[in-house]
Amino acid sequence: MPTVSVGRDLLFQALGRTYTQEEFDELCFEFGIELDDVTTEKAIIRKEKHLKEDDEEIGADEEIIYKIDVPANRYDLLCLEGLVQSLRIFCGVDSVPNYKLANVSKESMVKMHVKPETSKIRPFVVCAVLRGITFNEARYNSFIDLQDKLHQNICRRRTLVAIGTHDLDTIEGPFTYEALPPADIEFKPLKQVESYRADKLMEFYKSDMKLKKYLHIIEDSPVFPVIYDKNRTVLSLPPIINGAHSAISLKTKNVFIECTATDLTKAKIVLNTMVTMFSVYCERKFEVEPVEVIYPDGKSYVLPDLSSYNMKVSLAYINGIAGLSLEADKVAGLLNKMQLHAEKSVSEDNNDCIFNVSVPPTRSDVLHACDVAEDVAIAYGFNKIPQRTPTSIKPLPLNQFSDLMRTEVALAGYTEVLTWILCSYKENFTMLNRKDDKSTAVTIGNPRSADFEVVRSSLMAGILKTAAHNKDHPKPIKIFEVGDITVLDESKDVGAINRRQLAALYCGATSGFELIHGLVDRIMEVTGTPFVSQGDKTGYYIERSYEPEFFPGRQARIIYKGKHIGTFGIVHPQVLENFDIPDPCSFVELNVESLL
């Protein structure tokens, strides 16, 4: 969940009243968000610098900062303005704003012309103007912070959408959105004192901690996207940096917003979020000036689209999903608290009440009738919803069987562990003496850590790591895990399949083949599987195995009804050394699903 940091005093001033910490925490819970932390600006800096509180005197005048967790799809809550507006409506202080477009003729409307070359790299652009806006330091910082949060959230680090904001009084329309060779683009970027050619700018920003993470989006392209005004002044080089010429400041009165994108739908959501949140500071409150975007094929679009989205939802559906039995008037009131205007009508068969729900441009997260039902449940109060046990829900046979297996292995004296589903490539292969045949393990495309590079294709690495971290405990160490592994499978639409496995480890000075063999026999006994002679498909038997992770001659394959379902034996000394385990270990891993 994204976290929004707001000053407590500024928040309470905007809400129109003060709260104790407990009262505000309760309000957040009722609204479906969470007060995650209460801190100060200086405390945040101390934490970033790894300083202790004793290292610096804490002043009594430090501003209290509330860190609030909000749902990832509630883009309207990513700034102070959105939080305040939603909470005031929820508490019944304000009504839902009526966002509208300024009455501007098409001839005098600001225009953005899109060149055909942009289709090669970043084909879409949407724009709007906020006229007569009044900034102060807090509003300006919130405006910039909302852009950053949207870039990290719905914009997917600017790969889908990049936001540019400009002082309209420093530039002149019409504007053009073009795609040119890097050597043909030269301008002075934001916060710089000299001009750079676009290809040189890529090299310059490779040492910039903030911007270098976005260079890969366009640096290998033969053309770079760029926005010019009438006088060929560069507004921005999306998605990297804006031009210094049109930079906004506290004195800015008219803001031109452009969002270039590879996803038009998300671009419209981002633009709507920016203009609806900050039109509250415009001279004409909640009014936004539209911009005409003209594409190479001659089609033009007037944006932003601030019209409400309408859907029909039945009262029976809402009550059924939320587990409530509310009257129509009560449901309509709850929806109004969540910024959804609801009007009652009667279904064609006169058997049910139908709501015509109007969804404002701020609530892009409402896509389906179930979202409407969720808002009713939030406004009603999750803790007030009566508890019930659905009669139709039964555990899946695999989960039920897995629980029974856990119980039996635990009764045999083994302790259950739960290990990571992701592991390093080295742990999954090299440390287990295994070779990667490129057709087994699912590899993570862009891992955040070297510890989580692949999805485990065996439970063995996790079990051995657990034993290694507990090697100083009294022996024997007897642990087991029942969990899923993932292996590649081209026959599946996603290219991989999950398999439920059981693994157990016996670690101690007397760990022998017969100990883990006994556990295998016990598992087969409780599943009602008889031990049969080799080749008989009515039960199970064991045969010689040659797996590299086990000691040669001290390992066996488990054959169940003619199929190989698992392997057990003494773990190879080299594998034990790789995991820094000093004692001998015996191990078994078998497929649980095959026993169903």
Image (tube, rainbow, N blue to C red):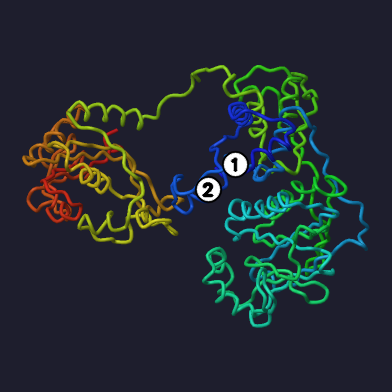
Label 2 secondary element:
helix
- Residue 330 lies left or right of residue 464; in this view the side is right
Residue 83 visible in rendering: yes
**Left or right of residue 187, residue 302 in this image:** right
Could you tell me residue 270's position as x and y percent? Answer: 69, 52
Residue at point 66%, 67% (across, down):
238
Q: Residue furthest bottom?
A: 183
Q: What is the three-letter code of the residue carrying label 1?
A: Ile
User: On screen, 129 above or below 566?
Assistant: below
Give the mark nearest the N terminus, 2 or 1: 2
- The correct choice, above or below, for 59 with respect to 94 in the image is below
CA gap, disc 2 to disc 1?
A: 9 Å
**Residue 563 visible at all:** no
Q: Quadrant of residue 131?
A: bottom right
Residue 499 x/y as whole percent: 33, 43
Residue located at (73% from left, 29% from top): 337
Query: Label 2, on which residue?
Result: 44
According to the picture, the residue beneath numbered tag 1 turns out to be 65
Q: Amino acid at mark 2?
A: Ile
Q: Is residue 9 above or below residue 397?
A: below
Residues marked 2 and 1 touching at CB (< 8 Å): yes
Residue at disc 1, secondary structure? strand
Q: Position of residue 467 (x, y in %)?
A: 21, 43
